[in-house]
Image: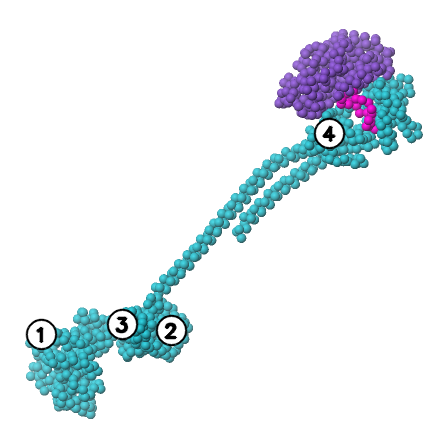
Chain colours: A cyan, B purple
Amino acid sequence: MPGLMPWATLVLGTLILGFIWTLHHHQYDRARDDVLATNASEHLNLATILAENFRQITDRAQAVVGQLVSALDEPDGAWKMVRMLASDPIFNRLGLYDAEGRALFSSHAPLSEALPAEALSALNAHCQRFGYVPYLATRDGVAERLSPSWRLPLLVPLPDEARQSIARVVRIDLDIGYLARLYQHIDFGPTGFVQLLDAGGRERLRANGAGVIHGGTPLTASYTPSPELRAGRYTSVADGLAYQSLFRHLPELGVTLVISQQYRDITAAIDDRESGHLLFNLIMSGVVVLGFLSVIHMLRRQQDALLALRQSEQENRQLISRLETEHARSRQAASTDHLSGLYNRRQFIEVAARSLAEQRARRCLAAVLFIDLDRFKSINDSLGHRIGDLLLQAVAGRIQTLLEPGDEAARFGGDEFVVLLAGNRSEQQIDAWAARLAEHLSARYQLDGTELHTSPSIGIAIAPRDAQEIDTLIRYADGAMYSAKRAGRGQYRFFDPSLNRVNIQEFQFEQRFGEALRQHQFVLHYQPQISIDSLQVCGYEALVRWQHPEFGLVYPDRFIGVAERSGFIVPLGMEVLRLACRQLAAWRAEGLETSVAVNVSALQLFQADFSERVLGILAEAGIEPRCLELEVTETAVLDREDVALANLEALREAGLGISLDDFGKGYAGFAHLHSLPISKLKIDRSLIAQLSNAHDDSLIVASTITLAKRLSLRVVAEGVETRDQLIYLKLGGCDIAQGYHFSRPLAAEQVRDFHDSFTTTTA
Amino acid sequence: MITIRLLACLLALLPALPAWSHSQCTSSLRLSSIPEKRLEIQQRDFQPLIRLLGEGLGIPVQMVPAGSYAGAIDAVVSGGVDLAMLGPAAYLLARQRDPHIEAFATPTLAQGHFTPAGAYYHALLVVRADRDVQTLADLRGARVALSDPASTSGSVIPNLEFPTAVGRPLQRFFAGQLYTGSHEKALDALLDGKVEAAFVSSPRADDYLRRGLISTRSLRVLWRSQPIPNDPLVFSSGLCGELRQRIRALLLGDSPQLAAFLHAQQASGLAPVAQAAYQALEQTLINPRR
């Protein structure tokens, strides 16, 4: 559309110019036509008046001739006639001729000898046509003495009595001076004049207001008016100039009066006005042209500007879309884990939050699965990071193949993957999906020529049952994953709220173990072991306590499990050993010679250098090995073989006491006891507790004591709380008792007082 | 061509006699004049003369106006008038048709701007002084005003004498000739700008000056003819001798009554004149220089 505007403007400008000039020409053509018509009308009137005047002249000629004819009969007639002619302003002289043209009388001798024959025949023809009326002679046969001729001869035919033919002819001369005087006050215009033509069309007189024109250029009519036409208008030309000619024809008198004026002269006033107007119109046209050119120019510029604007807009759009593409790419890059191509944690949380909200709106379940690869660290360490990365990519690929529309997956770093299951799944379907995932991820991997196996531990939290928020769900799933890991490889577990609380504390404990160790938050409490026979304190069992800054004194049943699972049990065990040794040294320094039993975890026993380190600690503290006793569990010695046994044997050899803790609780039988390097057997407190209730059970304790004795093992009873129990044990042959009956575990600084008072009491 | 034809005509007509003579004395006198001025002005100018003659002769004296020079000539030749003021050429033309026509008196011209004092005057070719026409060559192809074909200074002399000054006939030198019928109208046509030049008689130009119609700076004279004898007063052939004598006595008698008439004629008086005074001009007309 904008492209049409300059054209429309151009057309409009042309139309306006066309209008101006058409109007101009139309106006002036009309004005010219009008003034020509007015002029024509005036000049026709004038020609009519002059023709009428000429008719009166001929009438007068007839009257004069009549007087002559009657005067000639009188004696003094001729003289009278001459006197009359002299005072006549129109006619100067006359001559009378017979029918053959012979002169009969002349006012001025001699006028002419005779009328020429042609003149007579022409007169005859004229009379036959128009009757006996005066007639402007075309040829009079009288030679002119002066040039130009100052006379116009009229022939007046005098018929015979019967009016059958011409009897006589009078030639009477019209004084041109009279006509000149007649015309002198008529305004024919600057270029106008009157012509008097005879019957032959010959110009006999040309005159204007100033006088008779002689020697002017002949006037050529553009066409010859028909002889029958008595009046009219035509154009004539002289010296290349066009004249408007108006004529009045008097055929009966042989005369035509023509009044002519140059067209240019007639229209001079109009032409002057037009040239003034022309200048104005030219200026107006110039203004219009300039105006429209400037409008067109402006439109062009506007259009160019518009075009430029549009172009720049387009460029901007392209730029914006390019920026958007770049932005999307970079966002994608930022939101994607580069290794697996899955979401990273940040982006996953964003996406999953949205997805969760949608699921909630649709009243559908959503599940968050926290996946951790078993043994990934050892794979990474043994096979290298490259294989580790390939494995992660493969796992990511396998996870993705199982995803359905709406499901999202992410890698949280390391070997942790998180999946959000959306869609419309039931809990059973979620369970089945998790099982399928575990199976899938447990399948054999072929990575760059290396074949390997791994398995996932999967924790599952379900919204809205477990929680609504994504962060919470992830945390719960993580917790569930830990419980799955505890349950063994390739397992998956749902989040259980009651379990969750423990897990949470365990998790917190695990997080703070290192710090607790550095800040020596672990302390040992000591429970006395009493020799039943002597009722003397024969030693103490060191029990670890966590002086937790938030939770206060935390008992080992709450954090040892966590420490074992996290491997923290190893440094913790060593710390306990160090603390015990240091305490032994402190007591010795105070003069208190005693021994301490310390619990050792199975994991500690698996450490190859365990025995060396224990001996090192003892040496460092300056404690004799016999003062330290290690308590190990059934499972620790029964499950594992070589390393643990070797450690125990080395320590036993060094002189340390080894006691088997919690005997009678598990399923271990006596079959293997003989092969173990142990010196004591501790009967589990659950067996001791039954002693007071059911006598039936006492058999088990008794038989256990008996069997232990056969293996030359000393027997310790745990959890002795009553005197009855003590008596029973004494009767049964149990060597040592430990329990609330004697004392609860004591802080190290209380031990001295207890030791002294107990010894005193019993002594 | 024209002069040849003119000559032929003159020769052919010389022996002719008047149609009828009227020798007995008339009981009234008729007077005419060539129309040098407008008829009404001429009528007024001639009143003193008419009064003088009427009172002196004791008979009615009538002024008969002539429409043209030819009319005046015809009137004198035919005996239609008894007494006439003619131009020199008109007189000679009339005398060729009637040799008994007698010139008897002529005005003695007063000194004028254009005319010398005395018995002669000039034909002048004048242009407007405010137009840029300085020489005759500038007038070539222009329009020119003349008076009557029979006027001596207004047509006859220009036709005979002017061609020698420009080397070609009048008709071929000027683009158009306007015969106005009188000197006054010729001057008017010039002053009105209807023509670029005019042939006029010097006394008529002086008359315009005297009447305040022009000033001495209005006109520029580009050509001046040879001296021309002044207009004659003539008797027609039919006038009786007695009246001729009495008229002569009255007009040549320095009557103070004529002062106004003479003044109008630019004249200081009337002097007797004879045919001989026009001999030279007659020769020129008959035998013009080529």
C-alpha span from label 1 to label 3? 44 Å
Give the numbered dot on residue A401.
Answer: 2
Mark 1, other Cα within 10 Å: few <14 / some 14–19 / many ≥20? few
Q: Quadrant of residue B167?
A: top right
Amino acid beneath label 4: Pro
How far apart, in angstroms, are the residues tagged by discs 2 and 1? 63 Å
Identify the residue at image location x=65%, y=33%.
A269
Q: SS of the residue at dot 2?
A: helix
Q: Nearer the viewer, mark 3 or mark 4?
A: 3
Q: CA distance from mark 4 to mark 2?
A: 121 Å
Amino acid at the residue labelled 2: Thr
Q: Residues within 10 Å of mark 2 (few under 14, many from 20)?
A: few
N-terminal-most mark, 2 or 1: 2
- Give the left or right position of residue B252, taking residue A472 as reference: right
Q: Which residue is mark 4?
A: A218
Chain that bears disc 1: A
- Dot 1 or dot 4: first in sequence order is 4
Q: Tag 3: residue type?
A: Leu
- Is disc 2 on the same chain as disc 4? yes
Q: Which residues are magenta?
A: A135-154
Instruction: State whether discs 2 and 1 lie on one chain.
Output: yes
Relative to B79, say whether A307 is above or below. Answer: below
Which residue occupies 35% across, 72% down?
A: A397
Q: Which residue is identified by label 1?
A: A622
Please report the residue visible at 13 percent of the width from the left and 86 percent of the height from the top: A713
Give amino acid for label 1.
Gly
Task: Give the left or right position of residue A270, taking residue A743 as reference.
Answer: right
Residue A264 located within the stretch drawn in magenta: no
Q: CA separation, marks 3 and 2?
A: 26 Å
